[in-house]
Each structure stands twice: as structure tokens, then as C-alpha cells.
Amino acid sequence: MKKILTLIKCFAILLFCGAWTYPQSGVNYPSTGAAHGLIAGSACSTTKTTNCYGISTNTGTQNVPLYVYPGFGAEFNPWPIISYSSLLQKDCYEQGNQQACGFLNDQLNYLVSVGQSPRAGMTVWPVYPGRSDALVQGGISILFNKQFAYDGNAQWSTLRDRAGKAFDWSWSNGGIAHGYSSTRYWYVAGGRNNTLFALNVLTKSLINLTDLCSELGGDWCTRRDRGWNVLNAVGKRNAAVDDFNCPTCAPSGASNVGDWSYHRIATETAKASCNYHWLNADTLYRLVGRLSNIKDTSTIAFWANKWRTSYDNSVAQNICPARTWND
């Protein structure tokens, strides 16, 4: 019986994996614009089969991008869809690209259809089954808030507020808060099979909450302040910069993960990552820039600069690739 169930599961996976196609410009994503550039720049093809975008052909999800992960295959990850939708909004409403408007509707319809409500008044968009994520909740709140500003449909402001509620509920009640320790409430888990603290998830979501606080006030500011207080309290202890020349660490990954800050490892592989180090430094620095006029950001600013310096040193020593900082 177990073998039969395994075969059925495998067959279902094959069906799912077969329900997407290589992106075709002008057919299932725009032929021009910023959103076009996102998909075209990382499109799957006969020669690029992982870490790329495919386009769904399933009924009800046509033209929605899937990301093809090494070892996991094609999946609907809300975060890439949100990023793509945000560019479609700009192309549609600010550039007058009617083709982009049609593809934007496909994404919005999909996001509305897959939202889940583990608690009254709250909607979440899990990255993995049963696992909500602050990065996604913050990003989708911004997306729906902008859509409400563009077309005035109250559906989007309602969904924005329901997405924000996930910041108010504990992990066990379907929210994004995770008890990393008994004294720290607002940590965020990351990864498919683990609960590693993902610094860039926290900092990106705080950037989004800061923007929503500035525009809407109220609960959005409470959420931002709760997250900021946690980040500021543990900044020195948990944002310390390790030496990229760690003698037991290889540039592509460490055999001993303890030699690296878990902030900069890829949560899927538990390997040290130049990309995550840059991402953490970049998002910390941008968050400080948003809050510097209204809060004491000295602790986080100190560590953000340390992270930048550490990364720049790794570039100078040919350990990590050069990246542009987003000031």
C-alpha cells in the first residue's frame, strides 16, 4: 500500500511539473517593460533548467510564474509573484502598458485565490505549507495597498489589512511570529525544513512596515516598532561580522556551518552564501535610512556598516562578486 501511495504521489508531481512552459515574450509575459526584464532575465530554457522562471499552464493559473528550484522543481512562491506583480503595476499604471495590465490581472486573481485564513480577520500566503512568512506578508500588504491607490477597489485595502494581521498573531495561530527564544517574540523562521532566523526576511518586512506606517499609521506603526525593538536589542549579538577568510570555510559553502553567521547562510542548503551576506547588509542599511530621522539607529547603523565593509573586503580578495549597494 505504501508503494502504491508513493507511486501516486510521484505521478502527481510529474503532472504538476508538466503543467508549465518556457516563458514566451508577448505570449505569457509582457514584450516590453520592467516586468518583461525580470522574467526574460531569468527565464527557463532548454539550457537553463534551474534557478529560473517557468510559466504555469494550469487552468486558473495561466501566465503566473513558477520558480524552478534545484532539487525541488517548479513551485508557486508568493514572493517572486509579488515582485513580478509590483513591476507589472508600474508598467500598467505609470507607463500605460495595456499588455502589462492584462498580465497583472492574472497575478492578482491568483493571489486572491490562494490566500488562507487560519484566524478570523487574517489572511496569509504561505511560502511552504503551513508556514507563513513576514517577507511575503509585508510585500503583499504593499502590493495590495498600491493596487488600492491605483484603482480604488476596496477589496485591496481589505486584503492589505488582513495581510497585516499576520504580524499580530503568534506562530501557533497562523501568524508570522516565531518563538526563537523564550524572550524574543518577533523572530521570523526561514527555510523549508528548518526554523533558522532569516535576517533579510525581518529587515525587508520592516522596510515594508515602515512605508505602511508612514502612509497609514496605526497598527502598522505598532508592528514596525515591535520588529525594530527586537532587531535593535539583538543587533550587536546577532549581527556580528565573521571573517570571510575563515580557514575552514570554502567560498561556496562551509563544511562546518558554525564557522559562519547563520544570518548569511542560505536556509535551504545551510551553506555560507555571499549573496545572503550582501542581502543582509543591503537591507539593514536601507532600513536604517528609512528610520534615521525618527529613531535612534546607531546600533544597527554600526553593524550595517560593518557588514558592508566585510563584504567589500571579500570582493577585494576575490571571495565574493562585486555588488551594487542600494542607498
Image (tube, rainbow, N blue to C red):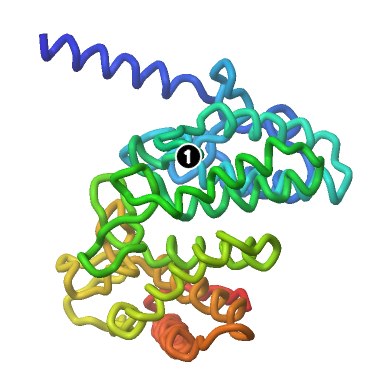
- In which quadrant of the rendered view does residue 10 lie? top left
Kind of residue indicated by mark 1: Trp
On the rendered image, what quadrant is the N terminus found in?
top left
Q: Considering the image in quadrants, where does the C terminus appear?
A: bottom right
The image position of residue 24, as x and y in percent, is: 67, 31
As displayed, is residue 86 above or below residue 22? below
Q: Picture coordinates of residue 81 (x, y %)? A: 57, 41
- Give the residue displayed 42% in from the left and 82% down from the top: 307
Left or right: where does residue 314 sit relative to residue 245? right
Rendered residue at 43%/81% (across/down): 311
**Of 191 and 309, the residue lying toward us:** 191
State the residue in front, 155 or 105. Answer: 155
Residue drawn at the location 61% of the way across and 83% of the way down: 294
Relative to 71, is 175 on the left or the right? right
Exactly how many numbered labels are in the figure? 1
How crowded pointer 1 is (Cα within 10 Å; few <14, some 14-19, many 20+) is rated as: many
- Residue 316 shows up from this direction: no
Q: Is residue 254 at all visible to an observer of this figure?
A: yes
Question: Tag 1, which secondary structure?
Answer: loop
Q: Decide which of 152, 237 is in the foreground and name it.
A: 152
Residue 3 image position (x, y, % from top left) = 13, 13
Tell me what residue is drawn at x 77 percent, y 50 percent: 90
Q: Which of 236/311 is in front?
A: 236
Q: Which residue, given by chain and number where applicable, does mark 1 sit on?
A: 125
- Percent coordinates x, y for residue 308 in the rendering: 47, 83
Q: Which residue lies furthest to the right in this view?
A: 96
Image height of 198 relative to 49, above or below: below
